[in-house]
Image (cartoon, coloured by chain):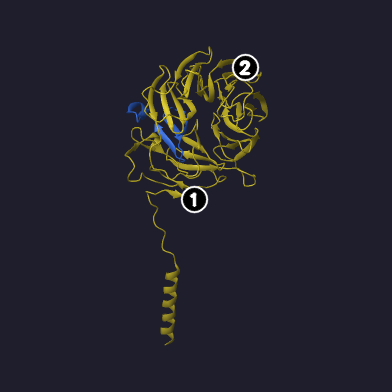
Chain colours: A yellow, B blue
Amino acid sequence: MFRTTQLTALMILMLMWAACTPPPAPEPESAVAPVAGENGEVEAVPISATVSPTPSATVEAIPAPSATPPPESPATTAGISGFQLPEGQEPGWLYHLTDDPHPRVTFSPTENVLATGHRDGRVLLWDLDTGRQLQALDRPVSAPSSGEITALAFSPDGALIAAAKPGLGTVDLWQLPTGEFAQALEAGQGVVDVAFSPAHRFLAGAIGRGQRPRVVVWDTESWTAQATLEEAGPAIAFTQDGLTLVTHSGASLAASAPSTDPESAIVLWDFAKGQQKQAIPVDGFIVSVDYHAEQDLVAATLLPVMSEGADPAPRALLLDARSGATVHSLGLPPDDSAPPPTGPDFVAFTPDGSLLAVGYQPDRIDLWRVATGEHLLTLHSPAD
Amino acid sequence: MRYPVVSSDGSLLAASSSDGRILLWRIIDLLQGPTNE
C-alpha cells in the first residue's frame, strides 16, 4: 500500500514536471521573414547568409537575420564574395527601417563593408560578403544624446569612421574594427558633411544647416582645428594630395542660411594657407561636389538660377579643375519620360573615373560616361 | 532614392531609398542590361 502510494505520487510529480517544461527550441530556420528590430522597425536581408559573429564585445549586439529571398523575389545569382544580388538592373537591398527615410550610406575603402547612418544616431556596419549586420555603433550610454546623422566617411585606412551630427554640432568618431567610440569633435551646429583627406591626415566638416556655410579642417593626429574656411561649403571633397579642399562659395540648397557671397563658384582651397587656388564660377545653387584625381575633374550637382531662356532643370557639371573649363554639362536626357526631379542630389565618380553617378530628388540616379558625356541609364527605386 | 555612392573597387553602386532600404547594384550589370526607364 505504501509503495503504491509512493509510485502514484512519483507519477504525478513526473506529469507535473513534463507539463511545466517548455518545448524544445525549434531548429533555426534558413529562410527568415522580416525581423522586428529593437525599436520595432523591420529589418530584412533578401540574400542567403551565413552567420558572422559580431567582432567586438564593446558594441551593441544586434541580432542579424539570416534570410533567403522571399518567393516573389527575382532570381538571384552569386555576387561579390557570396553576397547575392538580383540579376540585371533590379537592385538588391540590405536594410529596411520604415521610419528612417534616406539613411546615409558609404563603403569601406578597405573591407567589404558598407556603413549606414541613421536618425537615431547609430552607425550600422554591414558585411557585404554575407549581407549581415556586423555592428551598431553608438555613443556611450553616458553620452547625453545620439543625434541624427547626415553624413558618413571612412578614413582611407578604414580605421575610423566619422559621422556628422548637425543637431549636436559634432563629428562623432569610432575606431574600427573594435567599434569603440573615440571622440566627438566640436564642429558647430549644423555640420552636415564630413570628408577625410586621401592620406588620412585631415578631416573636414562642413557646416551648413541653419548657419552661414563654413568648413572646419582638423589634423587627425592632434585633432586640433587647422583651418576654418568662411563662406565655404557645405559640399566638400579633398583632392588627391590632401592639401586642397574642393568646395564652393555662394548659394547652396544645402545651406538654409544665406551666404553673403552673391556669386556661386566651385572653389579649390589651399586650406593650410587659407587661400583660394581656383574659383570656377557656376550659375546655380550647388548641392554636392566630387573630385577625381587622375583626371583632375570636379563634378558638381546644381539647380540653375532661374533666368529667362535658361533651362531650369537640375543638372551636373564636369569641370576641369586646372582650367575651370566646363567639360560636360549633364542635364536630363532629352527623351526623358520620367517625372521631373524636384532637385539635384549627390554626385559620385567611380574610382577609375570612367562613370559618374548623379542623384536627383526625390527618386532618381543617372549614370553618365565621363569621357563622352553620354547618358547611359536612369535608375528609380523599385516598387515593393 | 538619394546619396549614390560607389564602392572602392568600382563594382557596386549603392543608394538609399525613402523607405529606408539600402539599394545595391552591380555596375557591370547596369552597363550590360537594358535601362529601366
SS class, disc 1: loop
Residue underneath mark 1: A40
Nearer to me, B1 or A361: A361
Residue A258, image x and y in percent?
Answer: 62, 27
Residue A44 placement, left or right of A121: left
Residue B36 placement, left or right of A292: left
Amino acid at the residue labelled 1: Gly
Nearer to me, A257 or A151: A257
SS class, disc 2: strand
A63 is higher (above) or lower (below) than A357: below
Residue A130, image x and y in percent?
Answer: 42, 40
For the question of whether residue B6 can be seen, the reply is no
Count of numbered badges drawn on the protein: 2
Tell me the crowding category of disc 1: few under 14, some 14 to 19, or many 20 or more residues within 10 angstroms, Cα based: few
Q: Quadrant of the C terminus of chain B?
A: top left
Residue underneath mark 2: A276
The first of marks 1 and 2 along the sequence is: 1
A66 is higher (above) or lower (below) than A86: below
The residue positioned farthest toward the top in the image shown: A323
The residue positioned farthest toward the bottom in the image shown: A1
Amino acid at the residue labelled 2: Gln
Q: Quadrant of residue A335?
A: top left
Mark-to-mark CA distance, 1 and 2: 49 Å
Nearer to me, A285 or A294: A285
Residue A210, image x and y in percent?
Answer: 62, 32
Q: Quadrant of the N terminus of chain B?
A: top left
The chain letter under disc 2 is A
The chain letter under disc 1 is A
B25 is higher (above) or lower (below) than A282: below
Image point (44%, 82%), residue name: A6
